[in-house]
């Protein structure tokens, strides 16, 4: 058996809406090794959340259709699992922290009930033990356990986010999918949460897919980085490879966007000009070609393939095609 | 919670006062001179004047209002100018009748409406959902008295399954309840469906699914209570409307309720009956609303604080 907990293979997902077919995921492939953290980065609309939902078997359908691909969790295809089996995995072995903490908690139930319901379901314990555990989890994320008796609207945004994180961690999942979990938190709490997730990784060997825009956070927590663009992975590799030697012009652009404290010419933030292609009318060749400063003729005609540039470093770009220039 | 209830009850007082004034005014705007009507066709001018003073109808309107309200607060709702019976006595017999009909009709409409609404929301766009939507529209568009007549024609006359009218047997409730509740059922089913659909699209429902809850748990455990916050209000309003007397339907079935009483009184310009009955209807409407508000607060945690 491979040491990958999760393998996503050539995943294609489209949303068939009244206005047309949105090709959200176009051949997404990456692996999540056991006990490692993947930093999944990419700008808005790149398909990060959709990929995460697919792993949980929760792509909204209609309009979502998974047209091809495989998602192997412990060697078994999630897309072919029975409903019952999926349900037993969700929340227990794979747990997801959603992007919108403000609206992810049920407004009419106490936090304690919501948290202990999940624990009771997956761990076969009684209400009292479950509430106990829920209280422990709250304290871990820095909220007093008495707050179990509160309703969601009695928490601040950052606290709600921490409650969601506590919920996501409460059953010690093997795979944790965290969709921008630290956006609403101030820096100290954010650091605490990242510490917490690191601790979990060491203690329970939890694998994590950490979705974020913040490259700083990625550097903090990830072992591997996956850069998504228009529903596919355009570059992936170990943290060190990507941070020290980014290859794809898009990845390079992402790093250039970071404000550089050392540089004299600070002032306006750099941005990558242009926007992601409309997922209803994807270009034929490389999806990035229109914004690429180094685009060549072939980029407009042919879709590049994955090229293994070094060990643990793959890039999808014509620049590095055999016989092409520089290396 | 107790504090909240007190606050709500106190805030109702001004509403009640304004309602009583409005009712009083509207009744006095009705065409016709009450004194002349009481006196009858044959009365002389002097008789009419005597009656006018006897009933206090010569006083300014605000004095009449205060006199009337003084009586009301003592439980005296005046006497019918037609039958010379105390309105409170008559209402004591008729109101429970209407209450019974309204309660049963609301109960049936709520249970079936909520059930059907949930079912069709969880099978959105299915054949069943479309059929339900169509029937609900039909239910909304059909006047209850027409439905009542058709029911009588079909079940009593053609099939002979049920007695036409009389309030002896429990079974006599079936047709009135069915025809009165049809519209409320349609309203409640539509409301339930749409608020369930809204709730099912919320993030916390996706979250509940991601936590591994079964579909049934998601619908009944996570979504229903949220959807109910709006549905409860609808149910309460429907009950309030039905309490006002399903006027024409009561006539069709010969149901001796408030609606029947009111229609007769209006035709006879029996102004005291009209005034007091409308006041009682308004009062019960306000009380139902209060109960709905309290129920709403009970299931919606956000209310309790404010
Ligand atoms: N239910 C849906 N119906 C139609 N299109 C959808 C739906 N969900 C997502 N999409 C489309 O799929 C694409 C990917 O969306 P996704 O939410 O996965 O992006 P993301 O990478 O998570 O972005 P963000 O960083 O803003 O969260 C977008 O173009 C989006 O418009
Ligand atoms: Mg997203």
Image (cartoon, coloured by chain):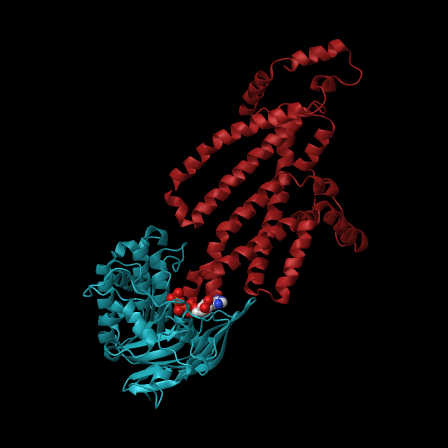
One can see residue A321 in this view: yes
Q: Is residue A23 above or below residue A70?
A: above
Q: Nearer the viewer, residue A102 or A20?
A: A20
Q: Nearer the viewer, residue A145 or A300?
A: A300
Q: Nearer the viewer, residue A151 or A307?
A: A307
Q: Is residue B83 above or below residue A36?
A: above
Q: Quadrant of ligand 1?
A: bottom left
One can see residue A81 in this view: no
**Looking at the image, which residue sits at the far top?**
B46
Q: Position of residue A96 (x, y in %)?
A: 36, 69
Residue pictured at 52% horizontal, 46% vertical: B233
Task: Note the chain letter of the cyan one.
Answer: A
Q: Is residue B33 left or right of residue A129?
A: right
Q: Is residue A3 left or right of residue B47?
A: left
Q: What color is chain B drawn in?
A: red
Residue pictured at 61% horizontal, 67% vertical: B126
In the rendered image, which quarter contains the C terminus of chain B? top left
Q: Is residue B295 left or right of residue B77?
A: left
Q: Position of residue A268 (x, y in %)?
A: 28, 60
Q: Is residue B255 above or below residue A260?
A: above
- Dividing the picture into quadrants, the one containing residue B24 is top right
- Dividing the picture into quadrants, the one containing residue B276 is top right
- Dividing the picture into quadrants, the one containing residue A252 is bottom left
């Amino acid at each position: 058996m491979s040491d990958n907990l999760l393998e996503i293979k050539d995943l294609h997902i489209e949303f068939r809406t009244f206005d047309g077919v949105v090709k959200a995921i176009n051949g997404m492939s990456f692996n999540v090794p056991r006990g490692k953290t993947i930093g999944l980065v990419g700008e808005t609309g790149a398909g990060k959340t959709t990929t995460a939902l697919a792993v949980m078997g929760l792509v909204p359908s209609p309009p979502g259709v998974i047209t091809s691909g495989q998602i192997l969790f412990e060697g078994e295809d999630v897309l072919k699992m029975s409903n019952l089996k999926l349900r037993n995995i969700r929340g227990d072995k794979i747990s997801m922290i959603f992007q919108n903490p403000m609206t992810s908690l049920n407004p009419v139930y106490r936090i304690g009930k919501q948290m202990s319901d999940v624990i009771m379901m997956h761990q076969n314990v009684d209400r009292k033990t479950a509430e106990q555990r829920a209280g422990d989890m709250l304290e871990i994320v820095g909220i007093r356990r008495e707050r179990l008796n509160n309703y969601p609207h009695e928490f601040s945004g950052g606290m709600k986010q921490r409650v969601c994180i506590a919920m996501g961690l409460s059953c010690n999942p093997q795979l944790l999918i965290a969709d921008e979990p630290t956006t609403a938190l101030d820096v100290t709490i954010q650091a605490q949460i990242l510490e917490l997730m690191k601790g979990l990784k060491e203690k329970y060997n939890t694998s994590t897919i950490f979705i974020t825009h913040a490259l700083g956070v990625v550097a903090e927590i990830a072992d591997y980085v996956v850069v998504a663009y228009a529903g596919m992975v355009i570059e992936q590799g170990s943290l060190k490879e990507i941070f020290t030697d980014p290859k794809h012009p898009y990845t390079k652009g992402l790093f250039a966007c970071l404000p550089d404290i050392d540089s004299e010419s600070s002032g306006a933030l750099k941005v990558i000009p242009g926007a992601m292609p409309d997922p209803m009318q994807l270009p034929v060749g490389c999806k990035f070609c229109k914004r690429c400063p180094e685009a060549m003729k072939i980029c407009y005609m042919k879709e590049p393939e994955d090229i293994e540039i070094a060990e643990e470093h793959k890039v999808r770009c014509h620049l590095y095609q055999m016989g092409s220039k520089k290396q | 919670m107790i504090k909240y209830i007190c606050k709500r009850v106190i805030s109702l007082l001004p509403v009640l006062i304004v309602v009583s004034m409005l009712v009083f005014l509207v009744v006095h705007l009705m065409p016709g001179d009450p004194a002349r009507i009481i006196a009858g066709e044959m009365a002389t001018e002097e008789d009419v004047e005597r009656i006018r003073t006897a009933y206090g109808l010569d006083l300014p309107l605000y004095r009449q209002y205060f006199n009337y309200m003084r009586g009301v607060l003592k439980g005296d709702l005046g006497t019918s100018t037609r039958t010379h019976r105390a309105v409170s006595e008559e209402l004591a017999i008729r109101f429970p009748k209407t209450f019974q009909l309204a309660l049963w009709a609301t109960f049936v409409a709520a249970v079936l409406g909520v059930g059907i609404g949930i079912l069709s929301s969880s099978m959105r766009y299915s054949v069943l959902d479309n059929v339900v939507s169509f029937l609900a529209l039909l239910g909304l568009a059909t006047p209850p008295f027409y439905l009542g007549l058709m029911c009588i024609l079909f079940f009593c006359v053609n099939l002979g399954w049920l007695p036409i009218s009389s309030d002896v047997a429990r079974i006599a409730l079936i047709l009135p309840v069915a025809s009165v509740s049809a519209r409320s059922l349609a309203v409640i089913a539509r409301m339930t469906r749409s608020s369930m659909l809204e709730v099912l699209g919320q993030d916390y429902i996706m979250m509940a699914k991601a936590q591994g809850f079964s579909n049934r748990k998601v619908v009944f455990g996570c979504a229903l209570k949220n959807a109910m916050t709006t549905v409860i209000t609808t149910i309460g309003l429907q009950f309030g409307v039905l309490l006002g007397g399903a006027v024409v339907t009561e006539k069709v079935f010969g149901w001796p309720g408030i609606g029947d009483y009111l229609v007769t009184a209006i035709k006879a310009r029996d102004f005291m009956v009209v005034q007091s009955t409308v006041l009682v209807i308004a009062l019960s409407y306000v009380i139902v609303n209060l109960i709905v508000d309290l129920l709403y607060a009970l299931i919606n945690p956000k209310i309790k604080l404010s």
